[in-house]
Image (tube, rainbow, N blue to C red):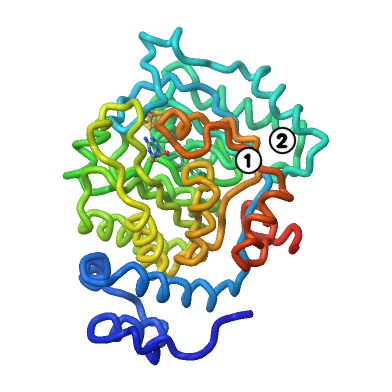
Amino acid sequence: MERTGRLAELPVFKGFSKLIAEKIDAGERILPEEGLRLYQEVDVASLGTMANFIRERRHGNRTYFNRNFHIEPTNVCVFSCKFCSYSRLYSNREEGWELSIDQMMEKVKSYDDQPITEVHIVGGVHPKMDIHFFADLIRKIKAHRPDLHVKGFTAVELDYMFRKAKMSRSEGMKLLNEAGLDSLPGGGAEIFHTDVRNQICADKVDGEGWLDIHATAHKLGMHSNATMLYGHVEQYEHRIDHMERLRSLQDITKGFNTFIPLKFRNHDNEMSHINEVSMIEDMKVYAVGRIYMDNFPHLKAYWPMLGRQQAQLTLSFGVNDIDGTIDDSTKIYSMAGSEEQNPTMSTEELVALIRQVGREPVERDTLYNVVKAY
Ligand code: V47
Ligand code: SF4
């Protein structure tokens, strides 16, 4: 059931929070300085009430998940992001993995008898795996299973591929789109602001480049997601700046589906000395994300990273999507110390998890068409 009634009438809201509640009631946009004050001044319970109100007004209790699997072609990477526990340099590649097209196709074929709607392809930036290698892979996947949605490659991987092939962003994107690439995942965004980016991932595509690559995909009619890596050296101002840039691009292109905050995990990387933020802070990030990103239809919590119980909690802080039933061979999080070391959940388990907290499970495809409502 969709939410009705006025948020600002709740006695808990006074002063600044009442003003924001009134804006939410009127469907008005929160300004950057107001976003900042939400982080600084408003308690987590009030933020949750606001975010949940918006979530229920938009989606009722519906909570989406999809059936997908991941392919990680390699963890060999030319870049050295300080938060990354997963990559290995080319000079050290005997410690990493590099999959051939045949090996990746074996993985695709291993799901032949399962009703999966999406393959998510993302990995390190390998100097020898070029745009033609990946176009060939995508063509083979589509030839084998034409209805499988291919969501692939962060803007970081794409930027490198296009530059190496001496193609413009629109030429490169068009080539991959014609090969069968359907949409882009949200990775590689981290924090756009150069003061932070220069400290944590100085050598990869900058914020403008990331946004331009997504805009290029949107122009071709492709959809994409956007992430934000939080809880390391960034300040609240940087998170607001990050969301503001995404929200502004979305005003123009309307191509983003989902905003996905990703919590920095500190296991076994060059930023291990930084403490991870609290669960309260996580809930604030989701809630402010839902309040601020008024033109993003969906807010996703990635359950393999958070763990099952915390993922359930996010559903009261604005989140309406908890990703997939994945036989998740994704190593980027397990190597960084995520809650789920071997994340697999059957559809039944995911449905039960959502129902247990009073929400309504809905299986979706990548573009949020309903596959099955439970
Ligand atoms: O960009 C890397 C993050 C991202 C760490 O679009 C880390 O549906 C925390 O973006 N601690 C890649 N995070 C994965 C990604 C993603 C995941 C699930 C769904 C979708 C989607 C996208 O992983 C990277 C980086 O921000 N990451 N290391 C770490 N130590
Ligand atoms: Fe490479 Fe991605 Fe790890 Fe950065 S986060 S080092 S781009 S694999």
Quadrant in which residue 209 is drawn = top left
Badge 1 crowding class, 10 Å Cα cut-off, few under 14, some 14 to 19, many 20 or more, is many
Residue 140 figure quarter: top right
The image shows residue 211, relative to residue 137, as above or below, that is: below
* Along the line of sight, the residue nearer the viewer: 313 or 57: 313
Quadrant of picture, ligand 2:
top left
Residue 179 makes an appearance in the image: no
Estimate the x, y position of residue 105 in percent, counting from the top left. 69, 24
> Quarter of the image containing the N terminus?
bottom right
SS class of the residue under badge 1?
Answer: strand
Q: Do the residues bearing badges 2 and 1 touch, measured as CB atoms within 8 Å?
A: yes
**Residue behind label 2 places its C-beta within 8 angstroms of ligand 1:** no
Give the quarter of the image for residue 20. bottom left
> Is 246 located above or below residue 202 in the figure?
below
Q: Residue at x 27, y 60 (%)?
A: 240
- The residue tagged 2 is 142
Which kind of residue does numbered mark 1 sit on?
Val
Q: Which residue is the extreme one toward the right?
A: 113
Neighbour tally class for label 2: few under 14, some 14-19, many 20 plus, Cα within 10 Å:
some
Left or right: residue 336 compared with residue 328:
left
> Residue 45 in the image: x percent, y percent?
37, 71
In the image, residue 354 lies at what x, y percent? Answer: 63, 59
Q: From the viewer's perspective, is residue 324 above or below residue 39?
A: above
Residue 237's disc is: none
Q: Amino acid at mark 2?
A: Lys
Mark 2 or 1: in front is 1
SS at circle 2: helix
Q: Which mark is residue 150?
A: 1
Separation (CA) of disc 2 from disc 1: 8 Å
